[in-house]
Image (tube, rainbow, N blue to C red):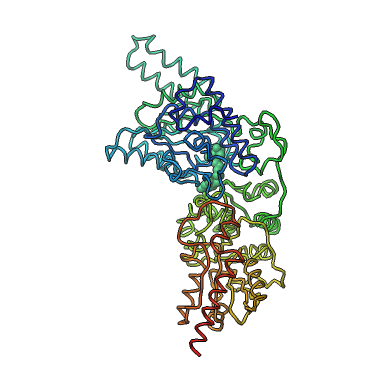
Amino acid sequence: MSELLAKITAPADLQQLTDEQLVQLTQEMRDELVRVLSIRPAHFASNLGVVELCLALHLTFDFSRDRLIWDTGHQIYPHKLITGRFPMFGTIRTRGGLMGYPNPHESHYDLFMTGHAGCSISCSLGLKVGDELLGSGDHHSVAVIGDGALPSGIVFEALNNASGLGKNLLVILNDNKMSICPRVGGLARTLDRARLTDFYQDTKRHMSKLPSKVPLLGGVANQTLHQLRDGLKALFTGGMLFEELGFRYIGPVDGHDLPGLRKWLRHVKDQRGPVLLHVLTEKGHGVPQASEDPVTYHTPPVFEKVGPERTILSLKRGGSKAYTDAASSAIYQALKDDPRVAVITAAMCQGNKLEKVREDFPDRFFDTGICESHAVAFAAGLAKAGMRPIAAIYSTFLQRAYDQLFQEVALQNLPVTFCLDRAGLTGPDGPTHHGAFDTTYLRAFPNFVVMAPGDELDMTPMLHFALNHPGPAAMRYPKAGLEKVERGVAPVELGQAEIFEWGPDGVLIAYGSLFPTCVKAAERLRQEGVELGVINARFAKPLDRQTLLRAVEQLPLVVSVEEGTLEGGFGSALLEAANGAGLDTRHIIRLGLPDRFIEHGERPELLAELGLDVNGICNVVRRQSSALRELQNVAR
Ligand SMILES: Cc1ncc(C[n+]2csc(CCOP(=O)(O)OP(=O)(O)O)c2C)c(N)n1
């Protein structure tokens, strides 16, 4: 039952609730998370963990004017529930429904549409400074960032800048000891130390009382005691790091004790200068299975059975194999075959299904944390030393490493292999996660080989090719079930497309994931008397100019099909090549993602809407073929 939750139309309504009612509200919010997420895969454990923190923040600040940024934004569900979106909560992550991330189009309580980690402190600082410069009032500015996102380089750039500016900025470190997988690296150890601080807290209290008890000692004694206190901090807490960076560090405090949290937030609300409040939470709090196994329950499959008291009795597992499975098996084999091969993930071991690689090749598996730019430069270093690194990074997250792709990899022409998972439409995550731009952003760089397997059968040979190529090579594959086009597969060779069929009425040139769809479309059109060929392009760079330009020259219709942006993508490469060769390009049609951000929804439904399914492709060909026939008749 959502008796109280249903009455919260805006955060101001929270002020009417008693402490007991607030406790009841936390239960109702968790019940609602379980109810909705039981039927729809979505971020689960992270949201369960921040219910009290979310309430405490909205009870302490007025975010209709103050500024709140949830880093990454995957833990925004409790915030959505109490900012007027409870009635629509059941639509979350469905086409036309609420987004699974902050969305300013949904609510003025969401300031930025985000999904990538790490930028909350920078944005909050910008908001603070902007508000001040414009004299638009004294708005509090708050960033909530997880310990998983904390190691991102940009976070330290922001902390450094915030401290330099000395602005009133509140950073809340939501420390649940987890990224998606357990957090890694030196910072993780620093934060672990901060948990051992009962001693520190007690000592600090006693020390700060001391000067008033020994007034005769005056200033010198005071200074000495402060130094002693700081020394203790250095010894016993992770907070010293933040203090050294110029932040006032407070904590760690219990993130599930709502009255306690409110007290701390009231305390820090009017502190001057940048403050970091370290809050300890439990990922999955309130659902035993989720808190025991937060990795699985980060984004679990739908629940098969839910018992009383939010007990999840079983998850619906299984389903067909995905491209990610094929990639992870190929990567595993590559590590087995060649001791120079190493694999790097930026906190996506689980998403990339690399757990077995992590287990069996611990020396050559590297989880950098959410640090894509470092991951790419690190891979460049490995390659320079003679290794054959594979950077397994989602298409969308690789954007965070653009300059390292340019300078450390492309410019040095180093043999780094990029496995770009989630290339294309990623479905319910929406615009922050669609891998729309990689073909465009990679093909701009000299030396880069840019590829996409047409189907499952291309996956292993393409990885093998990349690992044996002497320069950088990227392969993109979708978040989708594996598909296979039965054929005698041509070997993967540099800049060679694979001709599946050569049709007299035209050709579909598929770059990557939509090759099987093109084959189906051609089959359907054949039944209607249109004889189309299909080419599995495989390479966007270098392009198979010989094959593709022959098609442009000889065939009346050429349709390029890609699951990526049309701006500068594979179709653009084809047009450029045809134009460069002085060919007529008017019969080239490009299909792909239009020049706008694509909303969230299921991948097949988005593909259909964009005309990238069998129907859509057939319709384009039908329209074009009849237009061409008409033209030919007129010419006769
Ligand atoms: C730049 C970037 N890389 C990777 C991800 C994938 N990702 C989403 S949530 C997450 C873990 C975040 O951990 P933390 O910030 O501690 O939040 P928690 O889920 O533990 O609350 C990761 C790696 C991302 N969103 N953005």
Q: Nearer the viewer, residue 474 or 132?
A: 132
Q: Nearer the viewer, residue 40 or 441?
A: 40
Question: In the drawing, does residue 598 fall left or right of residue 316?
Answer: left
Say which quadrant the N terminus sits in: top right
Q: What residue lies at 48% left-to-right and 88% top-to-bottom? A: 635
Q: Position of residue 223 (x, y in %)?
A: 36, 20
Query: Splitting the image into four quadrants, where does ligand 1 fall?
Result: top right
Q: What residue lies at 63% left-to-right and 80% top-to-bottom? A: 503
Q: Is residue 369 visible?
A: no
On screen, 281 above or below 149? above
Q: Position of residue 506 (x, y in %)?
A: 58, 78
Question: In the drawing, does residue 166 fall left or right of residue 77?
Answer: left
On screen, 114 above or below 453? above
Please tell me how many numbered marks the rendered image carries. 0
Q: Position of residue 151 (x, y in %)?
A: 50, 41
Q: Is residue 358 visible?
A: yes
Question: In the drawing, does residue 273 fall left or right of residue 589?
Answer: left
Q: Position of residue 495 (x, y in %)?
A: 57, 72
Q: Nearer the viewer, residue 237 or 583?
A: 583
Specify the quadrant of the image occupied by residue 459. bottom right
Question: In the drawing, does residue 452 fall left or right of residue 11?
Answer: right
Q: Nearer the viewer, residue 541 or 142?
A: 142
On screen, 159 above or below 255? below
